[in-house]
Amino acid sequence: MWAQREIRLRPRPRGFHLVTDEVVAGVPELRELRIGLAHLFIRHTSASLTLNENASPDVRRDFEAWFDAAVPEDAPFWTHTLEGPDDMPAHIKASLLGPSLSLPVRDGRLALGTWQGVYLCEHRDHGGSRSLLVTLNGDA
Amino acid sequence: MWAQREIRLRPRPRGFHLVTDEVVAGVPELRELRIGLAHLFIRHTSASLTLNENASPDVRRDFEAWFDAAVPEDAPFWTHTLEGPDDMPAHIKASLLGPSLSLPVRDGRLALGTWQGVYLCEHRDHGGSRSLLVTLNGDA
Amino acid sequence: MWAQREIRLRPRPRGFHLVTDEVVAGVPELRELRIGLAHLFIRHTSASLTLNENASPDVRRDFEAWFDAAVPEDAPFWTHTLEGPDDMPAHIKASLLGPSLSLPVRDGRLALGTWQGVYLCEHRDHGGSRSLLVTLNGDA
């Protein structure tokens, strides 16, 4: 079985946001899969997806702190600065974390570990709404 | 053909460990695939998977050195510190490397390059046993 | 439908290079897929693949600048130095960006966002030709 759906995520502030429930709600066909994979893909170059701890908001705040320190807006070597100081760092962060997640599916559910949740990583100050394309494939 | 199996990896010290043979041995159905993909997924948020050089232990030691320097335990901005100084850096490292690998399969074997091997990246001091969920899909 | 093809990329200088058109031209079977996934896999440990901005050469130059600063050749902790000062940093960069991309396919084309393009990330000074293995899977 193959299914593909677009999910529009509402605009969110710069930072790391838990969106697991929103993603699962957007692909009802997930329940039909016995074994399979769910492929989540963000169609942007300044936002990304990752999987991490789904409990403490602290963790998501510390993600933002580390990425801002590791990819500073005022690095002397940026040349692509026309779209604002947050733009080029956003591109680097997006590639470090990546545009997609492939998640195993078992018995109609994402087979995540207890502590794993899907993060939308918004790297721009005003990134606006983001588009996810979710592709499901599996044994129904 | 779809198959899904859990592989329990024994506890390993913090660092980078070659586990290619262990993973292959854990999914005997791999041999039945003519063309396909093997999806390896670690069900944790403080350990990760990557593909890199399978020969020199030097390389794996230098991975640990770089990641420890890039994501220091004593960074002034950590707020999620309750679970120990190695916890928050482990979350960041896990997302930088990612929880999964999708590997091409050809004629019943992983179609890796000559020098590519699967690393278990253990980011905690005492991470314990780790669970992998391997999903195989392909043309039998 | 499954298809698998090797694409040989010609040698390129160290840096980040747009190769979307070359990859698409190398897998004519892509046109037959209504819904599916294209899996791109680089069979090396010192080059990688990522998805990012497909317009400004500035962005690709700034990628090189950031990665060179973040993974310096003269870091005091490298022990794997036999293959030259660019070798160990190349391994780290390769794992930060990853060896593969899974891209959604819709109506015979890669369903990328407007600004997304495939980068070959060449981390060695003289990396030579690079081999990609592309695996297509989908509903024809």
Image: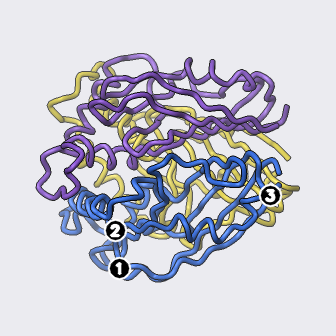
Chain colours: A yellow, B blue, C purple
Res C104 → quadrant: top right
* Disc 3 and disc 2 on one polypeptide chain: yes
Residue A97 spot, x, y in % from top left: 44, 47
Q: Amino acid at mark 3?
A: Trp
- Residue at 28% of width from left, 22% of height from top? A80
In the picture, measured across the screen, residue B63 lies left or right of residue B75, that is right
- Residue at 41% of width from left, 34% of height from top? A126
Residue neighbourhood size for the residue with mark 2, other residues' Cα within 10 Å, grouped as few (<14), some (14–19), many (≥20): many
Query: Is A132 situated above or below B87?
Result: above
Q: Which mark is residue B120?
A: none
Chain letter of mark 1 equals: B
* Sequence order check, earlier mark of 3 and 2: 3
Residue A14 spot, x, y in % from top left: 40, 43
> According to the image, label 1 marks what residue?
B83
* Sequence order check, earlier mark of 2 and 1: 1
In the picture, measured across the screen, residue C13 lies left or right of residue A117, that is left
In the picture, measured across the screen, residue C130 lies left or right of residue B21, that is left
Res A95 → quadrant: top left
Q: Amino acid at mark 1?
A: Glu
* Disc 3 and disc 1 on one polypeptide chain: yes
* Sequence order check, earlier mark of 3 and 1: 3
Query: Is C61 situated above or below A33?
Result: above
Q: Are marks 2 and 1 in contact (CB under 8 Å)?
A: yes
> According to the image, label 2 marks what residue?
B88
Q: Quadrant of the C terminus of chain A?
A: bottom right
- Residue at 67% of width from left, 25% of height from top? C27
- Residue at 57% of width from left, 33% of height from top? A43
Residue A106 spot, x, y in % from top left: 76, 65
> According to the image, label 3 marks what residue?
B2
Q: Amino acid at mark 2?
A: Met
- Label 1: which secondary element: loop
